[in-house]
Image: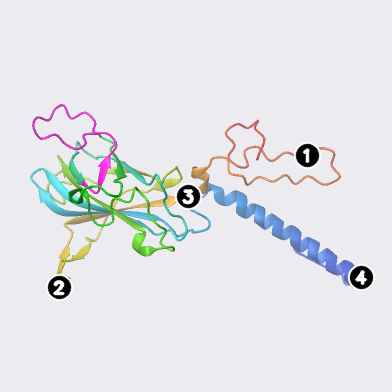
Amino acid sequence: MEKTVCSIATAPAQKSLSCLLKKLRSSIILLLFALVFPCAVAYDPLDPTGNITIKWDVISWTPDGYVAMVTMNNYQMYRHIMSPGWTLGWAWAKKEVIWSMVGAQTTEQGDCSKFKGNIPHCCKKNPTVVDLLPGVPYNQQIANCCKGGVIAAWGQDPSAAVASFQVSVGLAGTSNKTVKLPKNFTLLGPGPGYTCGPAKTVPSTTFLTPDRRRKTQALMTWNVTCTYSQFLASKNPSCCVSLSSFYNNTITPCPKCACGCQNKKSLCR
């Protein structure tokens, strides 16, 4: 970065103006770096430690799988998820199916033709889950569900920065050693921009009973962390600036693909 050096021989007024111009130039360069380069990192430059944490708590075993409480906490300070809301997806590690859900639903059932009698809620290898709308019957609700996928930012309203649903998973294994963690998590909220890491087993969550007099513990817990990137949300962000001199008779174009241009011949915005 260019250092601001002012000559003693310069007249006071000229000296002040020269220093001001050099400082202004340095500030502009720093601003351009802040606008252009953070686009490529996998977090929001306005909230670098913010994330959405998805937590799976296995609360009971079933004859062929488990029942889990899935909770999404929006730990972002400023970015909330507005209508049409979040969409959560993943890939099963084995041949799991979703027998039933409370507080959410999958967008497709998939091919369940091999099942007779009791048909699963979803048989897709890559299920996609969405929140229910407000006003659904009480027996389909669970705490922190049914808000149309809307989640407030933690810095705005911590009590509304959470969403939950319950899922009953079959063909999944019935112990900590036989259950395999889902893979390839995706989160849309409501557009692109989020990147999710792999599921990781963590210490089991501790819960209080309804009378708040006794602690219980999840049978198994894993977390998935999703972070926001402006670059993923918009492949061509408006962060490119022409630095042509005022006396130049032509406009110096922006560097090719400085803003992630899809078409190198396109003009930068």
To which residue does mark 3 refer?
42
In the rendered structure, the answer to whether residue 113 lies left or right of residue 257 reads: left
Left or right: residue 198 compared with residue 100: right
Distance in Å between CA atoms under marks 1 and 3: 33 Å
Asked if the magenta segment contains residue 139, the reply would be no
Instruction: Examine the rendering and report whether any part of residue 2 can be seen.
Output: no
The x and y percentages for residue 145 are 28, 52
Q: Which mark is residue 11?
A: 4
Residue located at (61% from left, 49% from top): 36
Q: Quadrant of the C terminus?
A: top right
Residue 155 is marked as: none
Q: Which residues are magenta?
A: 102-124
Q: Earlier in the sequence, mark 2 or mark 3?
A: 3
Q: Residue at x 24, y 57 (%)?
A: 143
Q: Secondary structure at mark 1?
A: loop
Residue 103 part of the magenta-drawn span = yes
Q: Is residue 216 above or below residue 138?
A: below
Determine which residue is flagged by label 2. 213
Q: How many marks?
A: 4
Mark 3 and mark 4: Cα distance apart in space: 49 Å
How would you rate the neighbour count of disc 3 (Cα within 10 Å): few for under 14, some for 14-19, many for 20 or more? some
**Real-space Cα separation, disc 2 to disc 4, in angstroms:** 78 Å
Gap between marks 1 and 4, in whole Å? Answer: 35 Å
**Mark 1, residues whose alpha carbon is within 10 Å: few (<14), some, or many (≥20)?**
few
Residue lying at 47% horizontally and 59% vertically, measured from the top left: 78
